Amino acid sequence: MQNTGLRLNIAINYGGRTELVDACRRVAEEVAAGRLRPEEINEQVIESKLYTHMLPDPDLLIRTSGETRISNFLLWQIAYSEIYITPTLWPDFDERAFLSALIEYQKRDRRFGGVAEPKPGLTAGWKAGQPLASAGD
C-alpha cells in the first residue's frame, strides 16, 4: 500500500478467543480432509483462517477509559501493535483525543518484536550473563 488512507474496523459482538478457536477448527478440517498436513501448519495458515485475514494488522490500538487490558480484542492481530491508553471515555473520544493518540504514536520506535539498543548509562556496571540484582540487594 502507498499510505493512501486510513482503515477503521468496528467489531460488534466479537471475541478474539472465539476467532482463534474458529481458525483452529478450520485448520483441523483442512487436515481431516487431507488438504493440509500437520507439518504445513504455520503462522500464515492460521492467519488465513482468521476473520480479518484480508486486513492488515493494526498499527495502533487505542484503549479508552483508562483500562489497561486488551479485553479479548484481536488477540492474534495486535501482537506488534502499539497500544495507546487514554482516560477519555469512548463517548467523549473526539478529534482532539484522536490527534493526541496519533501524536503519541508518532513518537514510538516500532521494532515489531525486536529488542532496542540499551540507552547509555542504563546498564553501567552490568555484564552479560550476570543477574541484574541479587537476593541480598
Image (cartoon, rainbow, N blue to C red):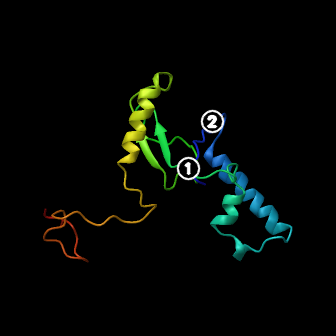
The residue tagged 2 is 10
Q: Circle 2 — which element? A: loop
Q: Is residue 59 above or below residue 45?
A: above
The residue tagged 1 is 3
Q: 103 and 59: which one is in front?
A: 103
Q: 14 and 119: which one is in front?
A: 119
Which residue is farthest top?
92
> Is residue 42 rendered to the left or right of residue 88?
right
Q: Is residue 133 above or below residue 57?
A: below
Residue type at mark 1 is Asn
The structure residue drawn at horizontal position 51% and vertical position 55%, both measured from the top left corner, is 79
Residue type at mark 2 is Ile
Q: Position of residue 110 (x, y in %)?
A: 41, 56
Q: Position of residue 119 (x, y in %)?
A: 22, 63
Question: Within 10 Å of the Cα at label 2, are there few (<14), some (14-19), or many (20+) other Cα atoms?
Answer: few
Q: Position of residue 105 (x, y in %)?
A: 40, 45
Question: Within 10 Å of the Cα at label 1, are there few (<14), some (14-19), or many (20+) other Cα atoms?
Answer: few
Tally of numbered tags:
2
Quadrant of the image containing the N terminus: bottom right
Which residue is farthest right?
33
> Is residue 114 rendered to the left or right of residue 20?
left
Quadrant of the image containing the C terminus: bottom left
The structure residue drawn at horizontal position 24% and vertical position 76%, both measured from the top left corner, is 128
Disc number lying in front (2 or 1): 1
> Is residue 117 rendered to the left or right of residue 56?
left
Q: 124 and 94: which one is in front?
A: 94
Answer whether residue 10 is visible to the viewer in this image: yes
Q: Quadrant of residue 72?
A: top right
